[in-house]
Amino acid sequence: MTLEEASAYFGIGQNKLRELTNSDSCPYVIWCGNKRLIKRKLFLEYLEKMYSI
């Protein structure tokens, strides 16, 4: 998912998604050049474990 799609799907702002995915070792992000793609299933699992973001 792109940041725009993930923002609409999860109800999280694009700036917050950028902040969460800035790390190079982020397990739920695929970098395609400069484009950030979020792995939906892994990100959903991450969100279920978090108390707050």
Image (cartoon, helix red, strand yellow):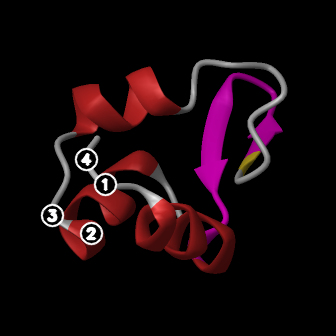
* Left or right: 12 as drawn, with respect to 42: left
- Dot 4, how many residues are within 10 Å of its Cα: few (below 14), some (14-19), or many (20+)? few
The residue tagged 3 is: 11
- Dot 3, how many residues are within 10 Å of its Cα: few (below 14), some (14-19), or many (20+)? few
Q: Which residue shows up at 37% across the image and 62% down it?
A: 6
- Does 31 appear in magenta? yes
In the image, farthest residue toward the bottom:
41
Using the image, tell me which numbered label, if any, was put on residue 10.
2
- Dot 1, how many residues are within 10 Å of its Cα: few (below 14), some (14-19), or many (20+)? few
Residue 22, percent from left and from top: 59, 19
Q: Are marks 2 and 3 in contact (CB under 8 Å)?
A: yes
The residue tagged 1 is: 51
44 up-or-down from 3: above or below? below
Residue 53, percent from left and from top: 29, 41
Name the N-terminal-most of marks 2 and 1.
2
Q: Nearer the viewer, mark 2 or mark 1?
A: 1
The kind of residue tagged 4 is Ser
For the residues labelled 3 and 1, the Cα–Cα distance comes to 16 Å
Q: Splitting the image into 4 quarters, where does residue 23 fall?
A: top right
The kind of residue tagged 2 is Phe
Residue 7, percent from left and from top: 26, 56
Q: Are marks 4 and 1 in contact (CB under 8 Å)?
A: yes
For the residues labelled 2 and 1, the Cα–Cα distance comes to 15 Å
For the residues labelled 2 and 3, the Cα–Cα distance comes to 4 Å
